[in-house]
Image (cartoon, rainbow, N blue to C red):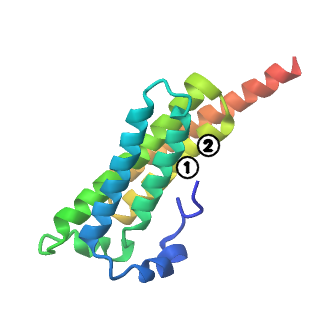
Amino acid sequence: MSAYLDAPFSDYEAKLDDIKDFDVEGRFRLLRKLGFTVQSLEDAFGENSKYSASFIEVWGKVATVGKNLVNLKTAVPDMDFNSPVRPTVLSHLSLVKQLFQRCADKYREQYELYTHKVQDFRAAVIYLQALRRIHIVLAERDEAETLKRKVEIWSTKLEADLKKAEEAKGK
C-alpha cells in the first residue's frame, strides 16, 4: 500500500503542485484509463486466476492514485454549482469512493474466504478509514458516521479473530 493512502493532504500537497498544469478533466481521464487497463488485465486473466489476489492490491493502488490526483483544497469549491469543472470533480470523487469501498470489501472477502491473514483484514480497515477521511473532508457527515461505525465493527471482529487464533495456538 502507498504511504499516501490515508495521509493528510499536507503530506502530498507539494507533489500536487508538480502537476498543477494537469487539468481536472485530464486527471479524471487518467484515472479512468488506469481503471480500464487494470479491469482489462483482470478480465484477461480470468476469474479463477492464481493472480486474482494480486489484483486487489493493484486496485488499491489505483484508488490511492485517484485520490491523490484530487486537490482536496479546491475540491469543495470545485463542487460548487457555478464551477465549470463540477461534473468532472463529482465523477472523479465518486469513482474514488467506489474504488476505496471495493478495495475494503475485496480485502475483507479475501481474509474471510481464502487467506485468514491479519494483514488483509487490516488493509480492509485502512481503506475504510481512508474513505471515511474523504467523506469528512467533503463534509459528508452521515457517510462518515456510517463508516466510523463500520470501522469499529470490523476492528472488533479483527480483534476477536486474533484472540481466537491465540487461544487456538495455546491449546
Determine whether the residue tagged by mark 2 lies in a helix, strand or loop. Answer: helix
Residue 51: x and y, percent?
54, 34
Residue 54: x and y, percent?
55, 39
Residue 29: x and y, percent?
28, 62
Q: Nearer the viewer, residue 148 or 89?
A: 89
If the image is split into quadrants, where does the C terminus sit? top right
User: For mark 1, what is the residue?
Assistant: 126
Residue 35: x and y, percent?
36, 50
Amino acid at pointer 2: Arg
Looking at the image, the residue that sits furthest to the front is 44
Looking at the image, the residue that sits furthest to the left is 82
Residue at the (76%, 25%) spot, across then down: 165
Report the side of 92 relative to 165 (left or right).
Answer: left
Q: Quadrant of residue 163?
A: top right
Relative vertical location of residue 24 with respect to residue 54 in this rendering, above or below: below
- Asked whether the viewer can see residue 128, the reply is no
Q: Nearer the viewer, residue 111 or 76?
A: 111
Report the side of 122 relative to 59 (left or right).
Answer: right
Amino acid at pointer 1: Ile
Residue at the (37%, 57%) spot, across then down: 135
Q: How dense is the environment of label 2, judged by Cα within 10 Å: few (below 14), some, or many (20 and up)?
A: some
Q: Quadrant of residue 53?
A: top right
